[in-house]
Image (tube, rainbow, N blue to C red):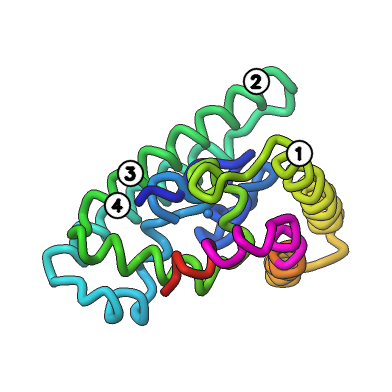
Amino acid sequence: MRFFTSIGCALVALCVLGVTPLKAQSLSPSNIGSLVKFLSNEKVRTTLNLTSSQRRQLDSQYSTLQRQVRTLVFTTPSNPTARAASEVKLKSIMKSSNSEAYSVLTKQQQAGLQKIEVKHLGGTLLLSDSIQKKLGVTPAQKAQIASIHAVTKTQNKNIHQLYQQGKISFREKIARFRTTRVNEAPKLLNVLTPAQRAAFTKLGS
């Protein structure tokens, strides 16, 4: 099951990668962030029972991703058109990385990953097109989800501006980004019908 599609820029991904984000972005190939970063967590690796070979492959992929993202972010131009092109490239990098990391896992591990994603990401997964399709999210619900996420992106943009102005530290910026994501998750879940909520919960069981 492929959850991790890029959504906007990779905000969550860049935060966990330790680089300054361009704007905003979960964890299998159609996730909203960095799957390979998520799979670098020892608790996740232990839960999925990753082999030594799998760990080495993922470590190598993560190092490559860090280099690619940092190079792109640190050279992002101020020109709007060029910046938009950089964001498109960033989404492509994240999508490719997520697919590559997902392919390292066995079918059984991929199923286990789904359960972990639902538990740890919660409503954030509703930003994924594949999850929306699986749950039968309607156009009206998609519009609600987009509206909620637009508010989060604006909040994150303001947070990033505070950081650029030197008013908050990088650590504080990341903490605030996480807070906006945590606050957004239940709002996204409230868009679902009772039947959809039950189906979503079942994904993690």
Residue drawn at 53 percent across, 69 percent down: 201
Q: Give the image quarter of residue 178.
A: bottom right
Contact between marks 4 and 2 (CB within 8 A): the answer is no
| Span shown in magenta | 186-199
The residue labelled by disc 1 is 140
- Residue type, numbered disc 4: Ala
The residue labelled by disc 3 is 99
Q: Position of residue 16 (x, y in %)?
A: 53, 62
Contact between marks 4 and 1 (CB within 8 A): the answer is no
Residue located farthest toward the top when viewing the structure as drawn: 81
- Residue type, numbered disc 1: Ala
Q: Position of residue 186 (x, y in %)?
A: 72, 67
Q: Is residue 188 magenta?
A: yes
- Residue type, numbered disc 2: Ala
Q: Is residue 118 magenta?
A: no
The residue labelled by disc 2 is 82
- Residue type, numbered disc 3: Ser
